[in-house]
C-alpha cells in the first residue's frame, strides 16, 4: 500500500465544514479584523527588557517553580479541546474569576517572578524577577543567572510607573480603576526617572481626552495588572471586573489552558488626527483565563500573543551577573 | 482513487478566475473586505486540513483563528507569492501545534477504535471498507507516533503542497522539509508494512 495514496484517501474522507461555521468565521474575521488594526501607536509599553530567544534550562525552570509562593500552576493541565464548551457568558467568566481572585490569600515574597513566552517580534521565552522597588532582573539565555537589563525601576501600569506601595493603592473599584488607567494613558509620557515613581492620584481626567484612548489598550493594561505586576487580590478582582464591564465580551471556547475570551470596545468616532481614514480602530484583546484558579494564561493584543507560563512571588533568584558579562561588548 | 486529496468547495488555483491572492491581499490593506475573497477561496480547505488533524470541533475554532491571524498580518504578506495557500497553511499549522497533545490523542483514538470522527459516516462501513478501516487505524497510529515536525511536513505534502510551498509554510529550508518528509514516509510505510490485511491491524500501544 502506497502511504501517500492512503494519506490522500484519509484526508479526502474528511467531511466538509458546516456552511454556517464558515459564514460565522468569515464575519468574525472581517468584523474583528476591520476594527482591529496593524501598527497603531502604542499608548503604553510593557517592559520587555532582554529578549531571550529559545528555551531555558529545565532545571532552572523547575528550581524556580519549586520555590514559587503564589498559586501558579504552570503547564496546560486545564480543560482540553474535547470538553464541551462552557455555557457561561464571557462576562460571567470574568466575574467568576474576580470572585476567585478576591478570595485568594494575599501573598508576598522577595521577588515578583514573571515567566512569559511569545512569538513576536521573534520567538522568545522571558523570565524576569522584580524587587519590591520594581528593579528588574532578567534571566540569562541559559537561565542560570540573572542580570539587570536597565536602570528602570517601578512597575509599569497603564501609562505610568508605580512603586509597589503605589501599586497597592490603586483603586479597587472597577470603574475607578478603569478611569485611572484611561487617565494614565491620556496624561502623556512622563519622563522616566529611575526609581522615582509618579503620582498615582493626579487631577481628574478632562473628559474629552479619553476620546483618543482605544478601549483595547485599556483592556490590555487591565490584563497586564493580572500577571505583570504584583497586584494584591482586591486589585486583581477589580481588574477582572473592569474587563467584564467592557462593551463586548465574547466567549470563544476552550483553548490551551483555559477559556478564551475576546474583549471588544465600542467603535470610536473618526479621529481628528487621522482625517479621512477609517475610524480610529477598536482592537480586540483576547485572553485565556484558567477558570480553576483565575490565572491569566495568555493575552493577545495587536502586538501578538504573550503566554504567561508562571507568575507569582518567590524568595529566590539566580545569581546576579553584570550586564557586560551577558552581552560582552563587541570589538 | 486519486492520489491528491479531494478538496471540497475550493477549486484548484489553476482553475480559479480572478486576481491572485497577493493582489487581493494588497488591496485589502485599503479595502479590508477584499480579504473576504481570500477567505472564500481557502477557508474550506484549511478547515479540512485542521479537521483531519484535530477533528471538526477544533477545526471550527481554528479556521476562524487562522484567518483572524492572517488578516491581522496581511500587511506583512510577501506580495511576490501569488497564492496565499502556503502562508495560510503555515498559520494553521502553528495554531495546530498548540494542540499537539489533542492531535496525538485524536489519532490514537482512531487507531484504537477504527472510527474516524472527522470523516463522513459511511452507510456500509461495516462491510466493504473493513480493509480500509484496518489501514486507517494503522495510519492513524503511525501519525500519532511521528514527531510533530515530521508530521507537519508529511501532512502538508499530503495536502497537495509542493515541497517548496510546504517549506515556506513551515519556514524551514526545502532540504530540511524533504528530509522530514522522507523520514516520515519511511516510518509510516514501516507501520503499514506490518499490517496483516487478513487480520487485525497492528495496534499502537495506548500509552
Image: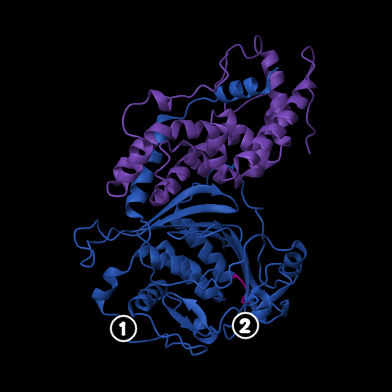
Region rendered in magenta: A104-108
Q: Nearer the viewer, residue B106 or B37?
A: B37
What is the chief secondary structure element of the magenta stretch? loop
Q: Earlier in the sequence, mark 2 or mark 1?
A: 2
Q: Please tell me which residue is depicted at 67% across the width and 43% down the height of the picture.
A: B101
Q: Which chain is disc 1 placed on?
A: A
Place of residue A328 in the rendered image (x, y in percent of width and height, measured from the top left): 65, 76
Q: Which chain is disc 2 placed on?
A: A
Q: In the image, which lettered chain appears blue?
A: A
Q: Is residue B10 left or right of residue B145?
A: left
Say whether marks 2 and 1 touch (CB < 8 Å).
no
Res. A149 visible in picture: yes
Which residue lies most toward the bottom here? A196
Q: Nearer the viewer, residue B72 or A200?
A: B72
Please identify the quarter of the rendering in which residue A42 is found: bottom left
Cα–Cα span, label 2 and label 1: 31 Å
Place of residue B182 in the rendered image (x, y in percent of width and height, measured from the top left): 69, 32
Q: Is residue A218 left or right of residue B32?
A: right
Residue under pointer 1 = A204
Hue of chain B?
purple
Q: Give a yes or no on whether discs 2 and 1 share a subunit.
A: yes
Place of residue A5 in the rendered image (x, y in percent of width and height, measured from the top left): 63, 20
Q: Dividing the image into 4 quarters, which one contains the C terminus of chain B?
A: top right
Q: Dividing the image into 4 quarters, which one contains the N terminus of chain B?
A: top right
Which residue lies most toward the front here? A331
Res. A82 visible in picture: no
Judged from the image, the secondary structure of the residue bearing numbered disc 2 is loop
Residue under pointer 2 = A131
Amino acid at each position: 500500500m502506497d502511504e501517500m495514496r492512503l494519506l490522500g484517501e484519509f484526508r479526502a474522507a474528511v467531511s466538509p465544514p458546516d456552511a454556517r461555521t464558515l459564514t460565522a468565521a468569515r464575519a468574525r474575521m472581517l468584523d474583528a479584523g476591520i476594527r482591529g488594526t496593524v501598527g497603531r501607536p502604542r499608548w503604553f509599553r510593557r517592559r520587555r527588557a532582554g529578549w531571550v530567544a529559545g528555551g531555558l534550562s529545565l532545571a532552572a525552570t523547575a528550581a524556580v517553580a519549586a520555590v514559587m509562593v503564589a498559586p501558579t500552576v504552570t503547564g496546560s493541565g486545564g480543560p482540553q479541546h474535547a470538553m464541551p464548551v462552557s455555557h457561561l457568558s464571557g462576562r460571567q467568566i470574568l466575574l467568576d474569576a474576580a470572585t476567585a481572585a478576591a478570595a485568594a490569600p494575599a501573598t508576598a515574597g522577595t521577588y515578583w517572578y514573571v515567566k512569559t513566552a511569545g512569538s513576536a517580534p521573534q520567538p522568545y521565552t522571558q523570565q524576569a524577577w522584580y524587587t519590591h522597588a520594581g528593579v528588574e532582573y532578567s534571566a540569562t539565555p541559559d537561565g542560570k543567572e540573572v542580570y539587570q537589563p536597565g536602570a528602570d525601576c517601578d512597575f509599569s501600569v497603564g501609562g505610568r510607573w508605580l512603586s509597589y506601595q503605589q501599586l497597592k493603592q490603586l483603586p479597587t473599584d472597577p470603574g475607578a480603576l478603569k478611569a485611572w488607567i484611561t487617565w494614565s494613558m491620556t496624561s502623556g509620557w512622563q519622563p522616566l526617572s529611575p526609581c522615582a515613581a509618579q503620582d498615582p492620584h493626579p487631577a481628574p481626567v478632562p473628559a474629552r481626552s479619553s476620546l483618543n484612548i482605544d478601549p483595547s489598550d485599556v483592556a490590555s493594561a487591565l490584563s497586564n495588572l493580572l500577571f505583570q505586576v504584583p497586584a494584591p487580590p482586591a486589585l486583581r478582582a477589580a481588574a477582572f471586573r473592569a474587563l467584564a464591564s467592557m462593551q463586548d465580551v465574547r466567549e470563544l471556547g476552550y483553548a490551551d489552558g483555559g477559556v478564551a475570551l475576546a474583549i471588544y470596545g465600542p467603535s470610536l468616532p473618526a479621529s481628528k488626527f487621522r482625517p479621512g481614514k477609517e475610524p480610529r480602530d477598536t482592537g480586540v484583546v483576547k485572553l485565556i483565563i484558567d477558570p480553576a484558579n483565575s490565572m491569566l494564561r495568555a493575552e493577545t493584543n495587536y502586538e501578538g500573543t504573550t503566554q504567561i507560563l508562571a507568575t507569582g512571588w518567590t524568595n529566590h533568584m539566580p545569581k546576579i551577573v553584570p550586564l557586560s558579562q551577558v552581552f560582552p561588548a563587541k570589538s | 482513487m486519486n492520489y491528491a486529496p479531494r478538496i471540497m468547495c475550493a477549486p484548484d488555483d489553476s482553475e480559479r478566475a480572478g486576481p491572485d491572492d497577493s493582489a487581493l491581499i494588497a488591496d485589502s490593506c485599503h479595502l479590508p473586505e477584499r480579504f473576504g475573497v481570500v477567505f472564500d477561496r481557502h477557508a474550506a480547505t484549511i478547515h479540512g486540513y485542521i479537521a483531519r488533524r484535530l477533528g471538526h470541533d477544533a477545526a471550527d475554532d481554528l479556521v476562524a483563528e487562522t484567518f483572524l491571524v492572517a488578516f491581522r498580518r496581511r500587511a506583512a504578506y510577501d506580495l511576490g507569492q501569488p497564492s496565499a495557500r502556503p502562508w495560510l497553511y503555515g498559520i494553521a499549522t502553528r495554531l495546530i501545534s498548540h494542540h499537539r497533545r489533542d492531535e496525538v490523542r485524536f489519532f490514537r483514538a482512531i487507531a484504537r477504535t477504527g472510527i474516524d470522527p472527522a470523516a463522513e459516516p459511511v452507510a456500509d462501513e461495516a462491510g466493504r471498507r473493513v480493509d480500509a478501516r484496518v489501514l486507517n487505524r494503522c495510519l492513524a497510529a503511525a501519525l500519532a507516533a511521528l514527531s510533530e515536525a515530521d508530521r507537519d511536513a508529511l501532512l502538508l505534502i499530503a495536502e497537495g503542497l509542493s515541497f517548496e510551498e510546504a517549506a515556506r509554510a513551515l519556514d524551514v529550508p526545502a532540504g530540511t522539509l524533504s528530509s522530514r518528509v522522507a523520514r516520515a514516509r519511511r516510518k509510516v510505510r514501516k507501520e503499514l508494512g506490518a499490517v496483516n490485511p487478513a487480520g487485525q491491524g497492528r495496534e499502537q500501544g495506548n500509552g
